[in-house]
Amino acid sequence: MAYYCKNAASAPCPDRAYVHADDLDALVAEWFTEALQTAPRMIDVVVAGRELEQAQTEQAKAKAELYAYVEAASALDPALFQRGLDARQGRVDRARDRVRELSGRVARMPVGGALSDLWQRFNPAERRDVLAGFIGRVEVRRGASADLRGHVGIFWTDGTLAEIADDEQGVRVAAA
């Protein structure tokens, strides 16, 4: 399978390119793996994912405590029962609000843990789904089949370019 430009009657491609899909997918996945560790915007997402996971655990614990209280405390004095119920419901409400707040900070995060932990286990289809939440487009220029890294531009969903560069030791750096 390959990606390539097609001349459309309305907008011909000024820089026709061709690249093997597996090669490009591998480059983007490698770049994203590095970005999870180095790009500030991705580090923020990873941290938010961990915070969200912790908040969801706290919410589940608060709900379990509320349900257990309702089941066990029904024989209490009605005023005491209501006070205990209100306190536990307040903890559930605060935990739910925290989960909602953190969920808003996390874009297309997979369920089941932090993205940095799950990424290595994902199959290509799952990786593409996650990448779609972070990458707006990948541009391939003529010459990519001979020098892929030098002819690819990866753009975040906000349109900013995330360059693939080499430092002095030949290690790739993902720039935000």
Image (tube, helix red, strand yellow):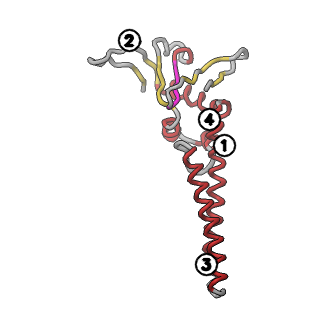
Q: Which residue position holds label 1?
A: 47
Amino acid on which disc 1 is placed: Val
The CA distance from mark 1 to mark 3 is 35 Å
Which residue sits at x=62%, y=46%?
Answer: 49
Say whether disc 4 or disc 3 marks the residue closer to the N-terminus.
4
What secondary structure is marked by label 1? helix
- Residue 70 numbered tag: 3
Please give the residue where the numbered disc 4 appears in the rendered image.
42
Instruction: Inspect the image, locate mark 2, and give the three-letter code of the amino acid beneath it.
Output: Pro
Mark pair 2, 1: CA separation? 41 Å
Circles 1 and 4, Cβ within 8 Å, touching? The answer is no
The nearer-to-camera label among 4 and 3 is 3
Q: Is residue 136 highlighted in magenta? A: no
Q: Which residue is found at the position 60% from the left and 40% from the top?
A: 119
User: For the residue marked with disc 4, what is the amino acid?
Assistant: Met
Mark 1 and mark 4 lie on one chain; the one further toward the N terminus is: 4
The answer to which image quadrant residue 176 occupies is top right
Residue 80 rendering spot, x and y as whole percentages: 67, 82
Query: What's drawn in magenta, residue-wise?
Result: 152-157
Dot 3: what SS? helix
- Give the residue displayed 66% in from the left and 49% down from the top: 51
Please tell me which of labels 4 and 2 falls first in the chain: 2
